Image (cartoon, grey):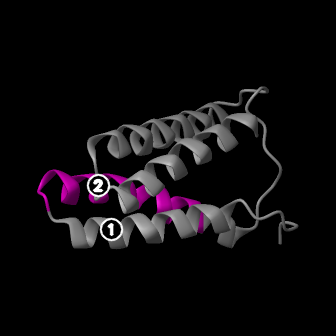
């Protein structure tokens, strides 16, 4: 769970920089580092690593995290094309979804 929180902090740092500094280059680095770290944790869980165990999540939490992670590559493409309006909207949506995915509810 520790590494998932680290990924979340990196992503949120990039999100804040991206929304306040008009998508400056460092924001992309932090967003990407958070995304890669979370994808690595998910891959380690899928491979059965005992060190990457996480508490069970409800279906909507898994879906929220999946949508947030899927939005990141699309968001980066919009930023590289200098189309900042869709970038900002996707960034805000991904930050909200990732935050919702971390809520501590019992799995259903």
Can you give x and y, in whole percent of width and height, for residue 101 in the image?
66, 63
Q: Which residues are magenta?
A: 64-82
Q: Is residue 34 part of the magenta span, yes or no?
A: no
In the rendered image, the quadrant that contains the C terminus is bottom right
In the picture, measured across the screen, residue 26 lies left or right of residue 9, that is left
Residue at numbered disc 1: 88
24 to the left or right of 108: left
Q: Is residue 68 on the magenta stretch?
A: yes
Instruction: Give SS at disc 2.
Output: loop
Question: What residue sits 33% from the left and 44% below the top?
Answer: 28
- Residue positioned 58% across, 61% down in the render: 98
Predominant secondary structure in magenta? Answer: helix
Q: Position of residue 76 (x, y in %)?
A: 27, 52
Pick out the residue farthest to the front.
21
At mark 1, the secondary structure is helix
Q: Which mark is residue 23?
A: 2
Quadrant where the N terminus sits is top right
Q: Residues within 10 Å of mark 1 (few under 14, many from 20)?
A: some
Residue 67: image x %, image y %? 48, 65
Are discs 1 and 2 less than 8 Å apart at CB? yes
The residue at 40%/64% (across/down) is: 91
Horizontal side of 79 relative to 63 (left or right) equals left
Disc 1 or 2, which lies upstream in sequence? 2
Is residue 32 positioned above or below 73 on the image?
Answer: above
CA–CA distance in space, label 1 to label 2: 8 Å
């Amino acid at each position: 769970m520790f590494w998932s929180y680290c990924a979340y902090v990196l992503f949120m740092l990039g999100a804040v920089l991206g929304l306040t500094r008009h998508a400056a280059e460092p924001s992309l680095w932090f967003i990407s580092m958070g995304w890669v770290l979370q994808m690595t944790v998910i891959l380690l869980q899928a491979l059965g690593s005992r060190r990457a165990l996480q508490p069970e999540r409800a279906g909507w939490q898994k879906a929220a995290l999946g949508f947030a992670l899927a939005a990141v590559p699309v968001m980066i493409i919009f930023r590289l094309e200098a189309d900042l309006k869709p970038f900002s909207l996707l960034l805000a949506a991904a930050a909200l979804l990732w935050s919702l995915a971390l809520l501590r509810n019992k799995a259903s």
